[in-house]
Image (cartoon, helix red, strand yellow):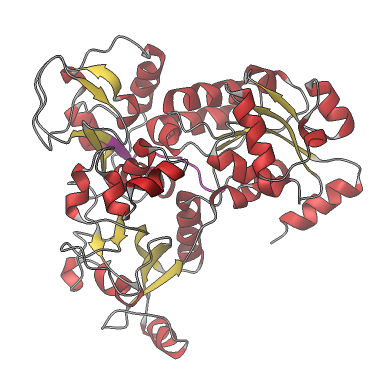
Amino acid sequence: MNLHRLLQARVANGKSVKVGLIGAGKFGSMVLAQAKHIEGYHVVAVADLDIPKARQAFDRVHWSEAQYSANSIADAHRDGSTWVTDDAAALFQDDQIEVIIEATGHPLAGVRHAMAAIDAGKHLVMVNVEADVLCGPYLAKRAAQQGVVYSMAYGDQPAAICELVDWVRCSGFELVAAGKGMNFAPHYRYSTPDTVWGFFGWSDEEVAAGDFNAKMYNSFTDGTKAAIEMAAVANATGLDCPDRGLDFHPAGLQDLAQVFKPKSDGGRLDKPGLVDIAASREPDGRVVLNNIQYGMFVTFRAPDQYARDCFKQYGLLTDDSGWYGSMWRPFHLIGLETSVSVLSAALRNEPTGCSNTYRADAVATAKGDFAAGDYLDGEGGYKVWANAIPATLSAQHNALPIGLAHHVKLKRAIRKDQIVTLDDVDIVDDLDLHQIRLAQRKMLSKT
């Protein structure tokens, strides 16, 4: 509740929080949209491989051309404007930039940018959940060693879930489950970029008229994005993924506490302490009443009869017994809120969610039967979906993480719904990432 006061104090001293942004896509555009409205919040430089597209992002969010026409990073510092470049390394090398926002969405580039930023002594806000679930625990440890903050991005669902989890624990309740809503039914699992628009109910004409990325939308549809985000939440909170992967239990607001409690108490969880998804569709496709498709939630148990009575007295939505309650946030605004993470890192030296443990993984799982010699096409593609499972099981399987499943060749055939292993594919590139993954495996949490 004090971030704005801290920012005002810095402004009163004639200083600003200086930020570097990597990636000017949708998320980056949303970051820029709000940055110009926050006094003392200076986006010094934006790095994107496509400079003309980055400039279009500024135009789209109503920046004047003069605001993003600095000829150098030195000019940007001097007159409070923004420099646009295709060289991310220039942001790391600048002595005055305090916080880097990594918003490329590319897992391999994200990890490498994070490493460079951390080693340069910059705080890192990792918008790129794909990179975080791939190597987040290793990056968080490295950041701590360097004395900088490694943080999830506020406004995205994982950070909002972490905030709810923190509220439960700081209030003295027993945390039972945490998760988010999602438009999902079981048959969505095998969606491809060719079929994805049918799940949104959009016509070919509507798709042609918009700026839509079929693989990105398919990642949301087939459950891959959910697996990535819930594995990241598990690593940040110490919760677990179900051994078989996320169950996607259909549940509306009125049902959260009833559904997301242990089976031993009439719920649907194998045990307390799990992450999962509140699906907004029944298995037959019907829309769930009062679903939380865009929201996040936690369920928790009263520690004693007095707290249980208070649940009832203050109108908390509970299960039938009254012992289990739920709390939720109905919406999240993605990059429009990410300044909270930036300011928290710069002014409080504190992350808004951080992958401190290695408890979960998002692993590549076959969408069909494929022969040796075929190439996998990664997140949101035709060949694999991601399953969120405990990291201990990922290690036992020697599983291929979804972030390393793009354009890799199969050495042997795989079958539908099989977890793809590192032994199934040719590893010829990205060896630095594989070395980081091996180092991260040594951090495996067995508790």
Residue 348 visible to an observer of this rendering = no
Q: Is residue 86 shown above or below 340?
A: above
Tell me which residue sits at (31%, 57%) in the image.
183
Query: Residue at the bottom extreme?
Result: 313
Report whether 270 appears left or right of 183. left
Q: Position of residue 3 (x, y in %)?
A: 72, 54
Q: Residue furthest top?
A: 428
Magenta: main secondary structure: loop
Residue 160 place in picture, x, y as percent: 50, 56
On the image, the x and y values in percent for residue 382 come to 23, 32
Front one among 6 and 408: 408
Q: Bounds of the magenta span?
A: 352-362
Residue 120 counted in the magenta span: no
Depth check, front residue: 397 or 75 = 75
Splitting the image into 4 quarters, where does residue 235 fall? top left
Residue at 55% from the left image edge and 23% from the top image edge: 113
> Which residue is nearer to you in this view: 175 or 427?
427
Q: Is residue 285 visible?
A: yes
Number of marks in picture: 0
Q: Residue 276, position in %: x, y? A: 30, 55
Quadrant location of residue 84? Answer: top right
Which residue is nearer to you in this view: 263 or 339? 339
Look at the picture and state if 262 lies above or below 224: below
Q: Quadrant of the C terminus?
A: top left
Residue under the point 46% across and 40% down:
356
Residue 262 image-quadrant placement: bottom left
Which part of the image, by quadrant, shows the N terminus? bottom right
Residue at 28% from the left image edge and 70% from the top image edge: 288
